[in-house]
Image (tube, rainbow, N blue to C red):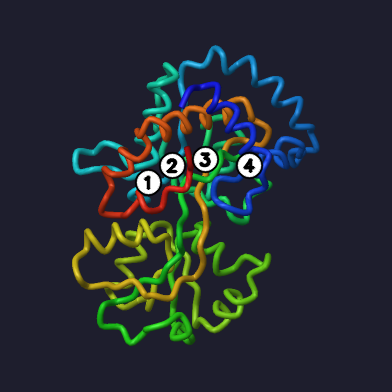
Amino acid sequence: MKKKVIALFLTAAMAVTMTACGGSNTKTNDNAKTDAGVDTEAATDATAGAEADRTTFTVGFDAEFPPYGFMDDNGDYTGFDLDLAQEVCDRNGWELVKKPINWDSKDMELNSGSIDCIWNGFTMTGREDDYTWSDPYIDNSIVIVVAADSDIQTKADLAGKIVAVQADSSGLSALTSEEDNDENLALTATFKELQQVADYNTAFMNLESGAVDAVVLDIGVAKYQLGSRGDGFKILDDQISTEQYGVGFKLGNTSLRDKVQETLYEMVADGTFNAIAEKYSDYNLSEMICLEK
């Protein structure tokens, strides 16, 4: 696909509301105001010129969120999202700066300018108006993991149980968000405790020791954990919710978003996007891609 066609497609895609994968809420974001009441159109104008001189691209990510971002056996940061970001940088002549962050500090990092985006299996659902988003590129589900010998078979069996989630995660949001979420709120109300932990390694250690009865998390991360920890766990057929991942930029930073988005569509069109996903075939990422040519 030629760049001109890609650009036309991108323009059309951004006019669609984010009701399905491949849509976008960027029109709403572009006309929104920041928490301080500053018109983001002015912020867009201020950043447009800076993008032409960009030499680095700093990605904020959770270093314990495989397969999207994690430290490999050699001590290097890697993952599906970081590989995508590296390809975007290579095509634009930027140096990729990988910055691991505390997930509950991600907004401070973004708003202070210490990172250019949050790119790490970042859930758009429920955050549509908080960031300037790329188009969604992954369809994801929030699932329940229990011990292999657990008597928990469905999410209804979580009543009276201790359930763990990562703090400020999509799993936590799926269980506690008050917007159009009556079923999951009712489910959460039946738990003995909803325990928040710093990372999923801690959650699985607690599950293995019996300190918690279940862990709620993203399906890609769940498959990674089960693959690396043996046969001691299982994913329930019941799901908490489905969601979509996007790249989150500071509200109003449409110039950088547009450049990254255009490059992603180029990568989809020439097959590079799917080739990167195939590197993580153990997590079925190719089946989850929803960014279309």
- Residue 37 vs 287, above or below: the answer is above
Query: Mark 3 or mark 4, which has the lower sequence index?
Result: 4
Reading the image, the residue beneath label 2 is: 61
Q: Are marks 1 and 2 in contact (CB under 8 Å)?
A: yes
In the rendered view, would you say 53 is above or below 276? Answer: above
Q: Amino acid at mark 3?
A: Val
Left or right placement of residue 181 versus residue 206 in this view? right
* Alpha carbon distance from label 1 to label 2: 9 Å
In the rendered image, residue 101, in percent from the top left (x then y), is placed at 45, 42
What is the three-letter code of the residue carrying label 2? Phe
How crowded pointer 2 is (Cα within 10 Å; few <14, some 14-19, many 20+) is rated as many
- Is 113 left or right of 220, judged from the image as shown? right
Residue 285 coordinates in the image, percent (x, y): 35, 50
Going from N to C along the chain, the mark reached first, 1 or 3, is 1
Instruction: Residue under label 3, please give it.
Output: 247
Question: Label 4, on which residue?
Answer: 131
Q: Position of residue 116 (x, y in %)?
A: 53, 30
* Secondary structure of the residue carrying numbered label 3: loop
Label 1's element? loop
Distance from label 1 to label 3 (Cα)?
12 Å
Q: Earlier in the sequence, mark 4 or mark 2?
A: 2
Amino acid at pointer 4: Tyr
